Image (tube, rainbow, N blue to C red):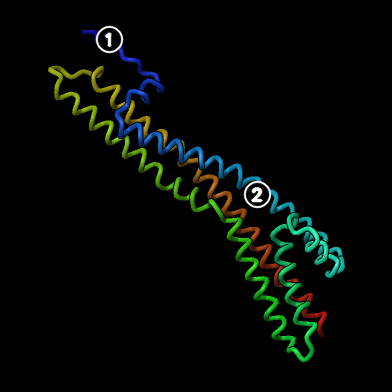
Amino acid sequence: MNVTVTQDMSVLSLITGASVPVQLVMTLLLVASLFSWYYIFLKVLTLRQADTQTQEFERLFWSGADLKVLFQRIVADPAAAGSLERIFEAGYREFAKHRRDSGVDMAAVMDSTRRAMRATYQREMDKLESSLAFLASVGSVSPYVGLLGTVWGIMNAFRGLANVAQATLAHVAPGIAEALIATAIGLFAAIPAVVAYNRFSGDVNRLAIRFESFSEEFSNVLQRQVR
C-alpha cells in the first residue's frame, strides 16, 4: 500500500505550524542568535582597533619619543586614545604628581605608579572582555534550549497518535520534523557563539599580556629616570 504525504514539509510551514511552546523556544533561540552576531561583529571591530592602536603606540613609545610629549598628546585628545595609551597616561600622571613632591621616597612613588597602571589595566580589560560572557552563555545553553523544544515537539507528535486508529509515517513525520528544527536552530545559535568566544578570548589574552609587559617595561623606564 502506498502512503501519500500531503502535508507541506517546508521549513517555514513547519515553524509556523509548530506548537506554541516550540515556537517560543525557536523565537528565543533566534533572538539569542541575532544578539550573538551583533556582539560578534562589534567585538571584531573593537579588538581590531585595540590591536592597531596598541601597535602604533608601542612603535611610537619605543622610537624614543619624549614621555611628556606623549602624555600631553593623549591628554589633548583622550577620545582617540587606546587602552595602552590610557595605561601609560595613568602611570605617567601618577609618577609626575609624586615626583614634584620633595622628600618623597622613590620606592613609594614607583609603587603608586604601578598601582595606578594596574587599576587602569583592569578597567581596560573589563571593556575588552565585555559581551564575552554573553557569547559563552549562548554557546553553552542554546543546544539545551533547542533540545527542550525538540522533546516537547516529539511528545506532541506521539500524543497525536493516540487519536489515530492506524499510525503511519505521514502522521508522525511533521511533528518530529518541527521538533528537530528546534535543535537545528539551537546549534545554529551555539556554534558561531562558541567559535567567536574562543577566538576573542585568545585575542584578549594576547592584548592583556602586551599590556602587562608594557607596564613593567614602562615602570623600568621611569625608575631609571629617578636614579
Cα distance, mark 1 to mark 2? 55 Å
Residue 207 image offset from top left, x and y in percent? 65, 58
The quadrant holding residue 76 is bottom right
Q: Is residue 42 left or right of residue 227?
A: left
Q: Residue at x 40, y 46 (%)?
A: 141
Residue 54 showing in the rendered view: no
**Which quarter of the figure is the N terminus placed in?**
top left
Q: Is residue 72 left or right of residue 206?
A: right
| Residue where numbered disc 1 is placed | 4
Q: Residue at x 65, y 63 (%)?
A: 209
Residue 170 image offset from top left, x and y in percent? 25, 17
Residue 128 showing in the rendered view: yes
**Which quarter of the figure is the C terminus placed in?**
bottom right
Disc marking residue 72: none
Callout 2 secondary element = helix
Q: Is residue 79 above or below residue 97?
A: above
Disc marking residue 46: 2
Between 138 and 192, the one nearer to me in the picture: 138
Circles 1, 2 touching at the beta carbon (< 8 Å): no
Q: Is residue 215 above or below residue 198?
A: below
The quadrant holding residue 66 is bottom right
Between 5 and 71, the one nearer to me in the picture: 71
Q: Is residue 29 above or below residue 126?
A: above
Which residue in the rendered view is the most extreme toward the bottom?
Answer: 103
Identify which amino acid the numbered label 2 is placed on.
Thr
Q: Residue at x 49, y 46 (%)?
A: 194
